[in-house]
Amino acid sequence: MNQPLDPAELARMSRRVVELRQEHRDLDTVIERLAADIQADELALKRLKKRKLQLKDQIAWIENALIPDEPA
């Protein structure tokens, strides 16, 4: 159950989602370039992919918090 948030908090959370999505897209680009490099550091690639998944989870959590609960 989400508690109602004030408009300032909603705006802050919405901005955060935009920032996280941008970082997610940037990581996607970096991962694609690194994966194309034959001499790429596999550990670095795995860390970037893990960070990308963490961002996806954070985005989903915040978006879920932004959706108001429907009364039963």
Image (spheres, rainbow, N blue to C red):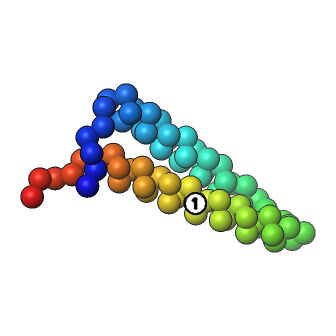
List x then y, in percent, for residue 49. Answer: 67, 65
Q: Quadrant of the N terminus?
A: bottom left
- Res 45 seen here: yes
Mark 1 belongs to which amino acid? Answer: Gln
Residue position for label 1: 54
Q: Is residue 39 above or below residue 28?
A: below
Would you say 36 lies left or right of 63 here? right
Of 14 and 34, the residue lying toward us: 14
Q: Secondary structure at mark 1?
A: helix
Q: Is residue 38 above or below residue 63?
A: below
Q: Quadrant of the C terminus?
A: bottom left
Q: Count how many numbered circles sit on residues in the image.
A: 1
Q: Is residue 62 above or below residue 48?
A: above
Mark 1 burial class by Cα count in 10 Å: few <14, some 14-19, many 20+: some
Q: Specify whether residue 32 is in view.
A: no
Tell me: 65 left or right of 27: left
Q: Nearer the viewer, residue 38 or 48?
A: 48
Residue 61 percent across, percent down from the top left: 42, 55
Residue at image x 52%, y 58%?
Answer: 56
Which residue does the image show at 80% across and 64% down from the upper left? Answer: 44
Q: Residue furthest top?
A: 8
Residue projecting furthest to the left: 72
The residue shown at (35%, 54%) is: 64
Q: Residue at x 43, y 56 (%)?
A: 60
Q: Quadrant of residue 36?
A: bottom right
Give coordinates of residue 66: x percent, y percent: 33, 46
Left or right of 70: which side holds 60?
Answer: right
Where is 2 relative to 44, above or below? above
Q: Position of residue 63 (x, y in %)?
A: 38, 50
| Residue 3 sits in quarter | top left
